[in-house]
Image (tube, helix red, strand yellow):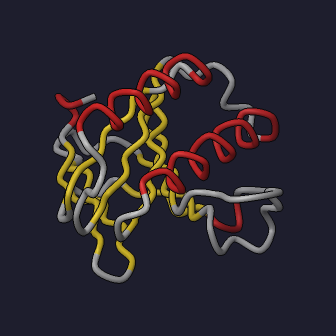
Amino acid sequence: MLESCTEVSKEKKIVVSENRSKFTFDNINGDKVKKIQIDGCESLVIQGRKCDWLLVINDIQIYVELKGTDIDHAITQLKNTILHIQKISGFNVVQKIFCYIVTTRSPLSSQQIQNAAKSLKKSHNATLRVKNTPCLVKPTDL
């Protein structure tokens, strides 16, 4: 189901971008990274909202939502995607889940972001990070 939308790479820079938002994983160790396009994948049927990308590195999942400014909407997309992917993918033995919302600018207060992060941690055991574009993530950040 995910295979048709998955690209496997060991490149040093794994980049996903949309409009003016850009997320880069600095794959300095040359690990095998599964780069899965979630939004726009015709073979993946997810009811409701979904995030843009999922990167899988060893036992780590990184869900990426590239946004302009609507962080509340992005949280809904991330939660729905995690729930669906866990059911269908066999990624149930994941030890770490990270969610990145990459914005052109963040309109929410730090308190609103902290509340959203607590909610995501409680409901999906996921760590939320909201970053302005361009966002660079290194293995030491995970």
- Picture quarter with the N terminus: bottom right
Coordinates of residue 33 in the picture (x, y in percent) = 42, 48
The one of 16 and 130 positioned closer to us in this rendering: 130
Q: In this figure, what is the number of numbered marks?
A: 0
Coordinates of residue 31 in the picture (x, y in percent) = 33, 41
Q: Quadrant of residue 67?
A: bottom left
Q: Quadrant of residue 23?
A: bottom left
Residue sitting at x 18%, y 40%: 138
Q: Is residue 70 above or below residue 64?
A: below
Coordinates of residue 64 in the picture (x, y in percent) = 44, 53
Q: Is residue 113 left or right of residue 94?
A: left
Q: Is residue 62 above or below residue 15?
A: above
Q: Quadrant of residue 141?
A: top left
The one of 87 and 2 positioned closer to us in this rendering: 87
Residue sitting at x 52%, y 46%: 75
> Residue extending furthest bottom?
19
The one of 105 and 135 positioned closer to us in this rendering: 105
Residue sitting at x 35%, y 73%: 17
Q: Is residue 19 left or right of residue 13?
A: right
Residue sitting at x 80%, y 34%: 87
Q: Is residue 13 left or right of residue 6?
A: left
- Picture quarter with the C terminus: top left
Coordinates of residue 100 in the picture (x, y in percent) = 37, 46
